[in-house]
Amino acid sequence: MSINLIQSIRTNILHIRSKETSIIGNLNTNFTVILKDPIAVSKDEELHVSLTSLELPYSFYNVSTALLNNTIIYENNVGVKTTLTLLSQDYSINQLVDYLNADSNFSNVFTTSYNTQRMKITFINTDIVSRTIYFNESNINKLIGFDEDELNIIVPVNLTGIESSGVINMCSVHSLFIRSNLSTGNVQSSRNGNSTILQKVSVDENSGGIVYFNQNDQQQISVLNPQVISQIEIRITDQNDNTIDLNNVNYEMSLLFEIFNKPKNNER
């Protein structure tokens, strides 16, 4: 039995250095590349694209405005809401607890503690009346063990306080998604259905290292629809579609474009 191997009829490799791109907005993880030599395919051809390399410094914080996970809204005075916004930076859970306890406004109402064995946070109301934490308006919830859609919680005056319903999660960025403006015909996601994700990259380094696209990541090949590609917009996000903030650190990636003859009906 013979096997017909389908080979590309031509290829293009695009090496991208973030410092040489046109940044969209204020983060260098959202940019446009203008191709000096556009990639064109005929109607009887098919274009595939895949990520072949990525060298991205782990310079993003686990708590930041970019990740939308650094605010807690609470009742400071009776009926008065106050927003505590954490500085964008890296935190361990103990550093985060220390930050909450060091904020004079927050600590005038609540004492925060962390149980290492249970991996849960507890808020104790130190005021003389009950106080509310407005979790349905806060976005720090998942970090400190509360649900994203947690209801507002009234913290009574007692020595028990309230404990987080779940465990803390300081690993806020689980994976990186390389997204583009290229229209793909074979990629879907649970969030949007038909998707513009070119590749999912595992974050298997600690802060300060370099995240590589490596053999542990399943390479994704996307089938593209346009006949001419003259510019490409790239955006790198976390699993929640938040654009990653690398704090102006540069990085590199490479894309492979492969052009195939479209199979005829009797070849399918």
Image: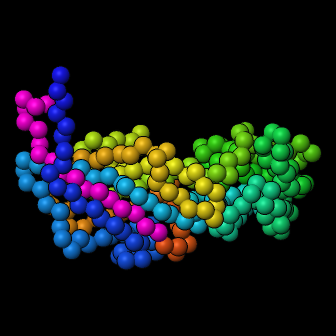
Quadrant of the image occupied by residue 79: bottom right
Report x, y in % for residue 77: 79, 62
Q: In percent of the image, x 54 and y 65: which residue is there?
A: 57
Report x, y in % for residue 163: 79, 42
Quadrant of the image occupied by residue 236: bottom left
Q: Is residue 126 magenta?
A: no
Q: In percent of the image, x 10 and y 31: which residue is there?
A: 267
- Number of callouts: 0
Residue 19 shows in this picture: yes
Quadrant of the image occupied by residue 31: bottom left
Q: In percent of the image, x 88 and y 48: which residue is there?
A: 157
Depth check, front residue: 79 or 228: 228
Residue 130 shows in this picture: no
Q: Is residue 105 left or right of residue 50?
A: right
Q: Is residue 236 left or right of residue 206?
A: left
Depth check, front residue: 198 or 45: 45
Q: In percent of the image, x 32 and y 70: which residue is there?
A: 32
Report x, y in % for residue 61: 62, 63
Q: Using the image, determine if residue 122 lies above or below residue 12.
A: above
Q: Is residue 135 left or right of residue 220?
A: right
Depth check, front residue: 96 or 199: 199
Depth check, front residue: 95 or 49: 49
Q: Using the image, determine if residue 8 lies above or below residue 231.
A: above
Report x, y in % for residue 197: 37, 50
Q: Is residue 208 left or right of residue 20?
A: right
Give the quadrant of the N terminus: top left
Q: Farthest residue in the top direction? A: 1
Task: Please state the extent of the stretch shown in magenta in the rendering.
Answer: 251-268
Give the quadrant of the C terminus: top left
Q: Farthest residue in the right direction? A: 159
